[in-house]
Amino acid sequence: MKKKVVFIINPKSGIGKKSIVEKEITTEIDTESIDFEIIHTKYRGHAKEIAERFSGKTDAIVAVGGDGTVNEIGSALVGSETALAIIPVGSGNGLARELNIPLRTSQAISVINNMYTRKIDVMKLNSYYSLNVAGVGFDSFISHKFSTVKRRGPLQYMRLITQEFPAYKSQEYTLNIDGHFFKRNAFLISFANSAQWGNNIRISPNAQVDDGLIDVCIVANFPNYAVPALLVSLLAQAIDKNKYDEIIHAKEVELMNEEPLLGHVDGEPIMIEPHSKISILPLSLNVVVPDEEFFKSSIFSPLREIIPQFQQFQQQISQFPFTKTKQ
């Protein structure tokens, strides 16, 4: 019996990828074993509405987009037998990278053709779901700023961080972590279901998506001279060894502040109520992932994946004024 799969494409994700990805879906999908439908989103929140409509009625719903699209669709599928699949075409692709889903579209489609699934945990922050990482502090401040810029992509994100970092002030936070109270002056606090924000930058290197725990990652206020060491530890996937970083494992966390906070779930900006709860929903989401045989097959080649990424990086670089050749 054929599997039923719905592809939900966010046309705003990826740089010039929409038509290419759609063509690859129609040519690479295994039509002998899969019946599929393609739907485009028209506004923020539309992907979740579509996924809710098909939840429980299809075998998988594919998020063709970035972390925001993945979050919308995954949020609609929590507790459903319908699986979340991903074709990553966003800026960070945090959950896709964590689940070893290839960034090359044809390879990601091959994973969907195989339809191998596993269950992962999901975090709930008040009424929001987070599949990957949620938080407050500097990264949330940047996510709110980033949501207003017209040009997207990792380079623009890094430029925004560089611009905003010097003036940003750490804040006081009060937390109840599994019944234990903490007060921290923090640069940021991340609630990690998986290890990374995206682009293989890992805020909690040992976090696992199926261990039933939230990794509460508290980056304390730090002096300017500590910035290089912090950056190196992030890039080396070793921030948990930095003295300004504290990681506490938890099943439930309460944020107990007097005023609303800027927050994010999977990079998407939200406002967090003064008294908020973050909890873990163990193994509550089915996801389509590569099986062990995929990485042994001729379909998967690291070089075939790296080249398109390098070409995309070159394209992004060429769009900045300082790379233009003077006439």
Image (spheres, rainbow, N blue to C red):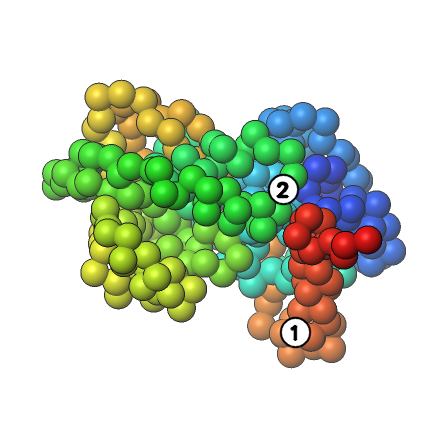
Three-letter amino acid code at the position of disc 2: Arg
Q: Quadrant of residue 211?
A: bottom left
Sequence-earlier tag: 1 or 2 = 2
CA distance separating discs 1 and 2: 26 Å
Towards the viewer: 118 or 128: 128
Instruction: Tell me the tag on residue 152.
Output: 2
Q: Does 216 sit above or below residue 57?
A: below
Three-letter amino acid code at the position of disc 1: Pro
Q: What residue is rendered at 38% in x and 60% in y? A: 231
Callout 1 crowding tier (Cα within 10 Å): few <14, some 14–19, many ≥20: few
Q: Position of residue 156 (x, y in %)?
A: 58, 45
Instruction: Tell me the tag on residue 302.
Output: 1
Is residue 60 toward the left or the right of residue 191 in the image? right
**Callouts 1 and 2 close, C-beta under 8 Å:** no
Q: Position of residue 283 (x, y in %)?
A: 43, 49
Q: What residue is rendered at 67% in x and 26% in y? A: 43
Q: Residue furthest front?
A: 327
